[in-house]
Image: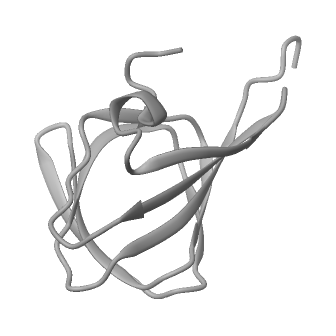
Amino acid sequence: MDSHDPAVTDPRLYKVVFENDRVRVLEYRDHPGDRTNPHRHPDSVMVTLSSFQRRVSAGGRQVDVELPAGEVRWLGAQEHTGENTGATRTHSIFIELKDIPGA
């Protein structure tokens, strides 16, 4: 397992709920004020199960994000940290795509 794998860097926040040779599905839950350690995701689809506010930091930049429950978003591969800056818990699902050998 990669040392920047979110299930390794933040096992209290990220939980692997499904995995096969094509995808890995992570459930993410946090509370206001929680922060993640630096980690990376491959190309992914994110599904927000709750509305939340957070600050995402990557490459010396910070972006404040506010998302409603029920959003489905494409996320290109990235390395970042995150912080719950709102007053609500975060609950989301990440569907990480795996490279297909020979594709």
Which residue lies at the image location 50% right of the left edge and 38% below the top edge?
A: 77
Q: Please give left or right for residue 26 compared with residue 12 in the image.
A: right
In the displayed image of the protein, which residue is found farthest to the right?
102
Name above or below for residue 100 compared with residue 16.
above
Name above or below for residue 73 compared with residue 49.
above
The x, y position of residue 90, in whole percent, is 39, 72
Q: Can you tell which quarter of the image residue 66 is in?
A: bottom left
Q: Please give left or right for residue 39 compared with residue 27 in the image.
A: left
The x, y position of residue 59, in whole percent, is 19, 37
Name above or below for residue 52 compared with residue 7.
below
Give 55 or 3, whichever is nearer the viewer: 3
Give 58 or 12, whichever is nearer the viewer: 12
Give 32 or 70, whichever is nearer the viewer: 32
In the displayed image of the protein, which residue is found farthest to the left?
60
Which residue lies at the image location 76% right of the left edge and 38% below the top edge?
A: 23
Q: Can you tell which quarter of the image residue 34 is in?
A: bottom left
Name above or below for residue 34 compared with residue 15.
below
Which residue lies at the image location 39% right of the left edge and 51% below the top edge?
A: 13
The x, y position of residue 61, in whole percent, is 14, 49
